[in-house]
Amino acid sequence: MDAFSGGGDRLWTRSGPEARAVAHLEPALWAIANLRLTVKAIAEFAHELLLLPHLEREEAGWGHYRLDAPDGRGRYRFRARRLRLESWLIDPASLRRTRDEDELPPDALSFIAEFQRPLGIRDAMLPIYLDEIASILYSDCYKRAVKRHTVTELADADFQTIETTMSEGHPSFVANSGRLGFSTADYPAYAPEAAGPLPIVWLAVDRDRTAFTTVAGLDHERLMAEELGATAIAAFSERITERGLDPARFLFMPVHPWQWFNRLSMSFAPEIAAGRIVFLGHSPDLYQPQQSIRTFFNATSPSKRYVKMALSILNMGFLLQRGLSREDMETTPPFNDWLSGLLARDAVLQETGFTLIREVATASYSNAYHDEALAEDAPQRDVLAAVWRENPVNLIKPGERLMTMAALLHVDTDGKPLVSELIARSGLSAEAWIRRYLHAYLTPLLHCYYAYDLIFMPHGENVILVMEGMTPARIVMKDLAEEMRILEGADTLPPAIRRNCAELEDDVRMDGIFTDVFDCFFRHLAQLLERAGTLSDERFWRLVADCVAAYQASRPELGEKFARHDVFRSEFPRNCLNRLQLRDNQQLIDPDDPDKGFEYAGRLANPIAEFAPRRRSGGVLGLLAGYFGVGGAPEG
């Protein structure tokens, strides 16, 4: 076997960790990953009007398109169908790339470089964005080489197996999982699709420097007793005593291992030397990284809480701001208490089974040097913080199981979508299955908006499906305080709640439905169902319209609001997430003003406008009778 010197007296072989870091980068897998990402880039950038493919001809229901690079040398040809919401369904097998008339294989990095100018990528940002694209290709090859579960296997899989096998997170972003900061040694330890269960780091942090907040009925002692247990608490207290310090001075705080090694142990060295931070060791339990990369699931004790920890990497348009802001940490538990109390007794939410998992405790440490030297909004101030969140495992009943909603967009390495497998094995027609899903997911979101002026960020990673067999029965919503907004009544709310209030112009007030639900999730789901031949795009959107109309017919007392904020209106602003990221991929939005700074480009035709009840015969009452079955649930 070949060998080479690794430095000093160490000898490495092809089977060593250096070789394993790149073992999945095989030419065939690399070609597939590049084809997939180039197709996605064309589709999403065209959807946002950054690129304008030219229609050359139409044939058998497909358009044949050409996309020319600005330098005139590069050219892409492909066939595609344009579905509702200007969704580009591109046939990957049809993509042909030429440069100076020479045919070349698709190359996602070359594609970004070729179209840098129309994409609006600044020269200074281009190298970082290219690194993000390379990182996504790297992880795609890993998933194809290692995570080869078929959809048949996944349909029966447990919650965490599904969580670690997902092919797609945020589907609208081209650069959706760059994770710059992770080395190839870090990747198998901390990336959700690669990592096995691992321990997390625990610190003791000075009470005087730490803001610790909980929901009513919970304190630090009870939280630690439930999360760590008496044996670990005693061992950690002894380590503090061994340093000649008083354990009563300190709170315990979990830390992401990467954050400890790459960030805190060096930049917080003065705090450690002064005895304000004490390294305690590793957790007695093992944890599983989730698709929401800062969040860990307790694999040793699956009923314990999630823990979410600051992580200073570049991911999804934020540099270092995968931290957790101090202000959010202090207001999160009281906000969660208020929100869950508001919604707990609502009849519509009870009927749909809509559930929130609260962020019940937060801890945030203030570095004295950072506080003195840095601006209040500097992300470096938020790098030592943690959140504990309730666990949905404790909410399920016999016969139920959990599945991330991102799974509905998952496609296995054979090109088969999991959603089609679930439908086929459910015993229901595709239409009946989608009706049940929409009743579980869309109905409570509509009700929260119209009855309470609340909008969530209900993308696939933030929603957990509660499944009965192969069919969605209800949903669990998470990530409440950071990404949920209140649109009315700010003056009447306590200060801790007011932080989540937003004043939006009427034209974009329904972004929480039109952008987050319709454009950023349903558009992709509808295309997947159309591509697989499971359900047509037209029929999917008709079912969405049916769900909306049935909900509205069941709540006549909200008729004035339905008219004022018309979900059936003919069009809405096109909110462009990639434009936002390409403008600044190190700070997607201002964390202190997240409701401003969005990028819009023209308008999108509303895919359900043509199916509005007033445009159909029979009216709303007929629709309601046909849609709902016994007890208000959709017929199956």
Image: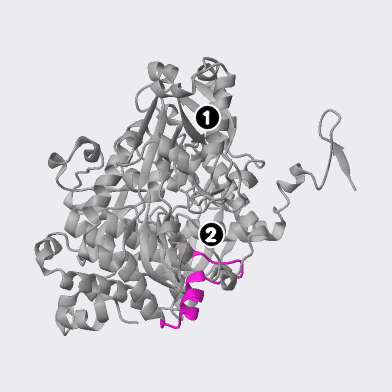
Left or right of residue 292, residue 232 in this image = right
Q: Please identify the quarter of the rendering in which residue 349 is found.
A: bottom left
Q: Is residue 481 magenta?
A: no
| SS at badge 2 | loop
User: What is the residue that sits farthest to the right in this orientation?
Assistant: 1
Q: Amino acid at mark 2?
A: Met
- Where is residue 569? Give x, y as percent: 19, 65
For the C terminus, give its image quadrant: bottom left
Q: Which residues are magenta?
A: 409-429
* Along the line of sight, the residue nearer the viewer: 197 or 479: 197
Q: Please identify the quarter of the rendering in which residue 616 is found.
A: bottom left
Left or right of residue 290, residue 99 in this image = right
Q: What number is the disc on residue 166?
A: 2
Residue at the spot 32% in from the left edge and 41% down from the top edge: 215
Q: Please identify the quarter of the rendering in which residue 164 is found.
A: bottom right
Q: Amino acid at mark 1?
A: Leu
Residue at the spot 44% in from the left edge and 42% down from the top edge: 317
Image vertical order of residue 127 relative to residue 509, above or below: above
Q: What number is the disc on residue 203?
A: 1
Image vertical order of residue 498 relative to residue 395, above or below: above
| SS at badge 1 | strand
- Where is residue 171? Give x, y as percent: 45, 57
* Along the line of sight, the residue nearer the viewer: 471 or 408: 471
Give the colour scheme of this rendering. one colour
Residue at the spot 54% in from the left edge and 66% down from the top edge: 411
